[in-house]
Image: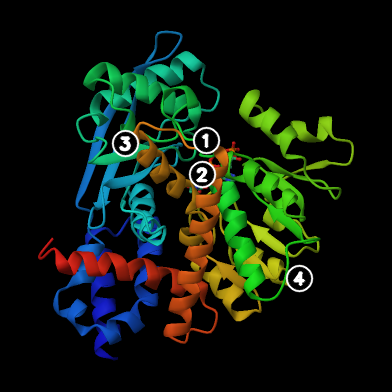
Amino acid sequence: MSNVKSHIESVKDEIQRRDPDQSEFQEAVFTVLDSLAPVLEAHPEYIKANLLSRLVEPERAIQFRVPWQDDEGQFHVNRGFRVQFNSAIGPYKGGLRLHPTVNLSVVKFLGFEQILKNSLTGLPIGGAKGGSDFDPKGKSDSEVMRFCQSFMTELQRHIGPDLDVPAGDIGVGGREIGYLFGAYKRLRGYQNGVLTGKGLTFGGSLARTEATGYGLLYYTNALVKAQGDTLTGKRIKISGSGNVATYAVQKATELGAKVITVSDSNGYIYDPKGIDYKVVQQIKEVERGRIKEYADRVASAEYHGGSVWDFDVDYDIALPCATQNEINKDQAKLIVKDGVKYICEGANMPSYPDAIAVYQDSNILYGPAKAANAGGVAVSALEMSQNSERLSWSFETVDNRLQDIMEDIFEKSEAADKKYQLDKNYQAGANIAGFEKVATAMMAQGLI
Ligand code: NDP
């Protein structure tokens, strides 16, 4: 085994020894480490400085109790997390997730991915992530508010506009950010740069709601164009029906493609005439309903139970926008069989490693999450800039910046792919491009 390979294996062994039960964290880190081999060949000083071992260890991982009371007066306790992973290139930045599956492994995988994603945006932000195993589904507004207030009672000690700036993720949208912001303000005073994804009346940025979905399509468009192809007329399968999926449907349709599916954790909608994002938005954002209701409102649509990735239909582009590990190896084989040419990830780590191996053994071009879904955090960073300036930019200004950032991310990933002769491996290209900036910053700052 080469020196580089054995070094990478020793870093993996150490993670396995220390955190044997953190399967999501291991999955995210091992995929990145494997793709960094060519960079370590070119930079033996990174091995000498034990840079990888430092990169995979969070600067800080905070876990706390979140007690709250439901509308019937019952007491509950959830677990809260904030993992401040890496501040080499800027203050910690990353979302908060509220979902029953949240645990330290999930938060660490998301925080680790966030380091390289944030680096790829070209903006000065470090990597973090947080959340709780609280399930907002079926809870009243008052229950969600009380939970958010209790969560912030502890989190406020650890965050700040120049220290750590949380945002939304699964289960955390405008409503939750509003409650969290209100709670922070009562405890620490008005500092509007402390959270992003805020309402437009109190320091939020135009286009933040749309940013991840739009950004995904700007990235996909850049990837497709680089192959001399176009989005016009392409049939697209999207999973999920939350924030990312909704605005991915809107932008894909605007760019001339036809989205034929959306889903939730119970089932999926198939509409061969093309999904109407306004109906999804009404059901999910306004009424907080289930995607099943789409079929009651649109005559050409059918609802089916189960995973959208088991649905056998010919199409051109897959955009998973729901959650981690939603596509397994067999489902990846179906994606290949159904004639898909491109897969770009709106969700974080939606494909198992053996599913990615299936894409890479086929002719599918694969745009990984940390590049393709960086639009949300990019516009969050633009929200921070607007808060610092005490100004609000127009929708067009933010949207144009977002488009430039997403095209730049594709170009950086492609340049790294070419530099290391990886043969259109945009996953490795994104990992390398994101890593190089963080590595340079860490080396310059001494033993951190
Ligand atoms: P939302 O909470 O708005 O929506 C999540 C969607 O995914 C819902 O349709 C939900 O269905 C579905 N989903 C969640 N868990 C599962 C599951 N286990 N199986 C099947 N479907 C599931 O979240 P977002 O749209 O904000 O986030 C979606 C993904 O995008 C996540 O991976 C997130 O980390 C990533 N992301 C989000 C960003 C953002 O700006 N919001 C930025 C970058 C990445 P159900 O209602 O049934 O749970």
Q: Name above or below for residue 322 compared with residue 370.
A: above
Q: Please name the amino acid that badge 4 sits on.
A: Gly
Q: Residues within 10 Å of mark 2 (few under 14, many from 20)?
A: many
Q: Is 311 displayed left or right of 287 in the figure?
A: right
Query: Residue lying furthest right in this view?
Result: 299
Q: Which residue is mark 4?
A: 339
Q: Which residue is mark 3?
A: 388
Q: Residues within 10 Å of mark 3 (few under 14, many from 20)?
A: few
Q: Quadrant of residue 146?
A: top left
**Mark 2 touches mark 1? (CB < 8 Å):** yes
Q: Is residue 57 visible?
A: yes
Q: Is residue 352 visible?
A: no
Q: How is the image coloured?
A: rainbow
Q: Which residue is mark 2?
A: 398
Q: Quadrant of the N terminus?
A: bottom left
State the image coordinates of residue 237 (x, y, percent, origin top left). 71, 55
Q: Secondary structure at mark 1?
A: loop
Q: Please name the amino acid that badge 3 sits on.
A: Ser
State the image coordinates of residue 420 (x, y, percent, origin top left). 42, 85
In 3D space, how far apart are the residues under numbered discs 2 and 1 (Cα atoms)?
A: 7 Å
In 3D space, how far apart are the residues under numbered discs 3 and 4 (Cα atoms)?
A: 47 Å
Q: Which residue is mark 1?
A: 206
Q: Please name the amino acid that badge 1 sits on.
A: Leu
